[in-house]
Image (cartoon, helix red, strand yellow):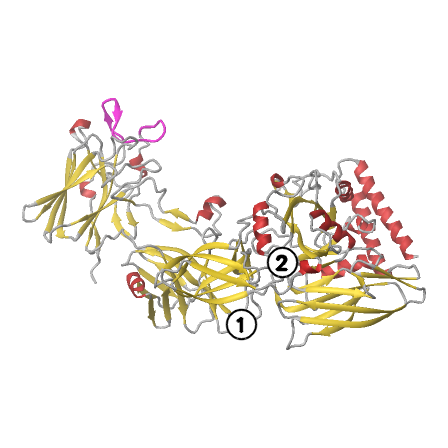
Amino acid sequence: MADPFVPLELIDSCNADGANVRVGDGWLWPFGGEDPQNTQLKRMPTGDCLFWGVPFKVAPADAPSKYIAVCGAETTAPQVPASVIIPVGQRARRLLFAHACAGVADSPDGVGEEVGLYRIHFDDGSSVEQRLRRRFEIHDFTIRWGHHPYGCRVCREFESVPLDDKVGSWGRTQVGTMTRNGGSLEGWWLLDWVNPTDKVIDTVEVVASGTAALALGAITVCQEETDPFLWPGRKEIAVTIDDTDGTQAPQLRVDRGVLARQDRLFVPEADFLTTDVAGFGLGGQQVREGGYAEVHASTEGRLSVNGGGEGEADTEFRWGDVIDSGSERQGKVRIEVVGARGKEWVHVRVEDADSGKPVGSRVHFRSESGAYLAPHGHQSDVNVGWFEDLGGDCKINGTPYAYIDGTCQIELPVGTAYVEVVRGFEYEPVRQKLEIKPGQRNLTLRMKRTFDMKSRGYYSGDTHVHFLTSQSSHLEAAAEDLNVVHLLASQWGRLFTSWEEFTGGLSPTSSQDHLIWVSQENRQHVLGHISLLGLKEMVAPMCTGGPDEDWVGGEIQALMADWSEECRRQGGLVIMPHVPSPDFENAANIVLGQADAAEMCWIWKGEQIGLGERGYYRWLNVGQKLPIVGGTDKMSNDRVLGCSRTYAKLADDEEFTFDNWCQAVKKGNTFASTGAIIDLKVEGACMGEEIHLPGNGGTVEVEATAESVWPLTAIELVVNGVADVREEADPNHPHKISLNHKLKTERPCWVTARCWGPHQTGAGPVMAHSSPVYIDVGGRETFEATDGEYLLTQMEGGISWAEKIGVFKDEAVRERLIALFHEAMSELGNRSR
């Protein structure tokens, strides 16, 4: 097949090299800065170029003359002629010109000004003319923003920027596009001239006719019937390669176009609608790496697919054939256009099935072939980098979701599509197959509440959230059916986050069911972290002692105990986050009662008692009354708000307020959850309460219940850190387990309940863990000597560190820390007796 493009060799006709020429009191070519020889003409692309996938041959950079320049008689530049004749000598369906003119069209007078013309001479002696008007067929070397031309195109092409490209600023990278060979406001302008005859073109005469100089860089002879620069709109495709498991992304290339995006396909399988893993980005799907692509290309362009790696031949598709048919197959490679039957803008409403009211939710739409379809305004590429793209979207186990307030607009393909709708832990997740009709404008989805914890007096909260705004906190809280969000300001070297959101009260974005309060997590890389919730005034400094929390060379200016005391002075709630680490000063502070609760975060292990639980049990084993809470430590879009959460029970008929919720946490009737509901009673006593037995002990009745919309594996009682008794789930009814046990004890103990299931949530397995019920025997409280020894060793290490390594603001701070450790050691000694 003959090449449809033949670039002409113009070097013998070139008469300019970019050097400036005096014209009266001015200069022929525009220039930058004060140097008139820094001409814009010198910055134009040279040599063999591809513009919109079409080859052009500009003279090379080292050529004596690189351009054809003409100027009118009014310009009076003797060394620059008024016309130049270029030989062609062949038939052409079209001629493609790369040219530009001098000047800046910054006034209405410049628009439409004729700066020259092309006179095309045929071999029979006839000719036709093509006028060159500023901003129509030609434009300035550099144009002002908003002054794009009407009838020609810039040679710069847009292409996608990989999200891991950090060469430019992150904000620009997120725009997703850049231009080849410079910016889109400068360069050669491309004119598509259509030959009105089938005659042989003998020559092209370039004629200047105005006051501005004209430069021609290249001409390409084109035999295509259609404008080679007029590409149809971007299309989304699904690429499937037989006999592969989808773990290796196919290599895609487009020779006359742009591969704007390549991402995963989430291909629904037979059990997609019935799997019990819905909600966590898993189950009923096959993930095909790189199987989704967005392509913007000429219909004559070639899409090449290589799925077998180096050495295997590419499979090629003509892009116009793919668009026209909607589905093309060659050998084992199949290409499907997403929305080949068209797309419709659909208004989506998610309702509570009982009330009919719209409810916030987390949604995932996908095409039949598995392409993720983001609601309008949401990210298609959900970035999960630290401190990037936070709010409004998330990824769980690699699957993207969008947060909506109960409504959204989305462009859905006509035909089959799928949707998943999730709302926290108390609603049954919805997976549904959709059939979108031509002209459809509305779609209503309904969710059914399985549990109503508020009717039981329990309200949920996330004690540990970073980087969201107070508005995005509310959006995501409503979507995850979360009642309280503690958005925590903090410091990360020289980066201070969320401090501007601080109001000293409920955020104005709060609503009756979803309360947002911006407080602080104060941090020290050795001594530990501490969450100060419900602050009325900010507590400075936020971080001390050097990196990674404070800045390089920072000194310890305040103790965690100081921060705890200030929070309590303000009536706040003190949480020791992500137990057990860091646990340096915590070893003393918790023993001395400086914490209201301990937070389980992202260290759940399921059936195995994990590091976090063992750390928590250590405090309980030295007689500490310490409720459990759940928080996410959310710092990126790969962690779902409230995926580790706290349920706190208010007193009967008590109003749900922020203060009442915090008081409920302090009282200890709480459980932490990553997807399950748990309840524990010992002799009728609730979590956080105490039971008193006589000196010889006794037997108590323990009742525990676990529930979840996701299947459970077992429920287990833990007594003084040791798993005591377990009840397995009935495989036929795995969503609820009850355990009744008579516990005989002759010594002080505490009792907790924990449950788990088989599925991963993004914060660990589906789990729940209760706060303890405390049992004293003869007035004595729990004390396990081995845990006491461990904490004493921690405190001895703290003293050694303070004496030898720590850098303090002054000796008074050092001495207070050492005294704190000694006080806690003394307290532990008293408890051990």
Query: Can the viewer see residue 456?
Result: yes
Q: In the figure, 725 relative to 192: above or below?
A: below
Q: Nearer the viewer, residue 369 or 67?
A: 369
The disc at residue 580 is: none
Instruction: Name the quadrant of the N terminus.
Output: bottom left
Q: Please, what secondary structure does the residue beneath circle 2 have?
A: loop
Position in image of residue 782 (x %, y %): 86, 60
Q: Nearer the viewer, residue 824 or 505?
A: 505
Q: In the figure, 804 relative to 250: above or below?
A: above
Task: Kindly indicate the quadrant of the structure image that contains residue 10.
Answer: top left
The majority secondary structure of the magenta stretch comes to loop
Tell me whether circle 2 and circle 1 mark residues in contact (CB < 8 Å). Answer: no
Disc 1 packing (10 Å; few <14; some 14–19; many ≥20): few
Q: Nearer the viewer, residue 63 or 692?
A: 692
State the residue lying farthest toward the left.
124
Please give the range of residues in magenta: 20-36
**Residue kind at label 2, given as amino acid type:** Cys
| 350 within the magenta span | no
Circle 2 is placed at which residue position?
643
Disc 2 packing (10 Å; few <14; some 14–19; many ≥20): many
